[in-house]
Image: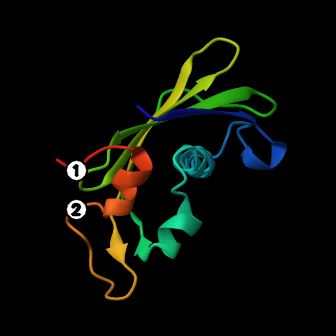
Amino acid sequence: MYQTRLKINVPFFDVDAMHVVWHGHYVKYLEMARSELLRLFNYDYPEMEANGHLWPIVDLRLKYVASARYGQDVEVIATLKEWEHRLRIDYVIQCCDTEQVLTKATSIQVAVAIDTQEMLFESPPILFERLGVEPS
């Protein structure tokens, strides 16, 4: 199982008038953790593109449980759950001090061939190679 943990100290410019992290910034935190996760198996966005594929997000779901605040240390835990036909990554954002869950999320990405712009119905072989697994 591939998983990464990314610690973020919430910056002032990410909070809104209610002094909590604006809801859209959570997506930025997920992206930061997703890139860290992809780098674990050497298949971050530059490697995807170099191998002829784009991986757009086609579904993103977030459940806000509690608010993060300025100066708070939060941890984004990203876990790769599916890779055969798509990339599904599950996330938990939690307070570092209390481990209180602040947000849960899931992102879905699909492979698209750069040359034809067609969506692939199976992940490209390079992904399996980088993960060190055999296709089913």
Percent coordinates x, y for residue 45 in the rendering:
55, 64
Residue at horizontal 38%, vertical 53%? 129
Q: What residue is shown with label 1?
A: 135
Residue count near mark 2 (Cα–Cα under 10 Å), binned few <14, some 14–19, many ≥20: few
- The CA distance from mark 1 to mark 2 is 9 Å
Where's residue 18, x and y in %? 70, 39
**Of helix, strand and loop, which one carries label 2?**
loop
User: What percent of the width, then of the height, locates residue 118?
Assistant: 27, 81
Q: Is residue 58 above or below residue 133?
A: below
- The secondary element bearing badge 1 is classed as loop
Task: Tell me which amino acid carries mark 1.
Answer: Pro
Query: Is label 1 in contact with label 2 (beta carbons under 8 Å)?
Result: yes
Which of the two residues, 73 or 37, is positioned nearer the viewer here?
37
Task: Tell me which corner region of the image, top left, top right, bottom left or bottom right, holds residue 89.
Answer: top left
Is residue 59 something one can see in this rendering? no
Position of residue 133 relative to residue 108, above or below, is above
Specify few, some or many for label 1: CA neighbours under 10 Å numbering under 14, 14-19, or 20 or more: some
Residue, disc 2: 122
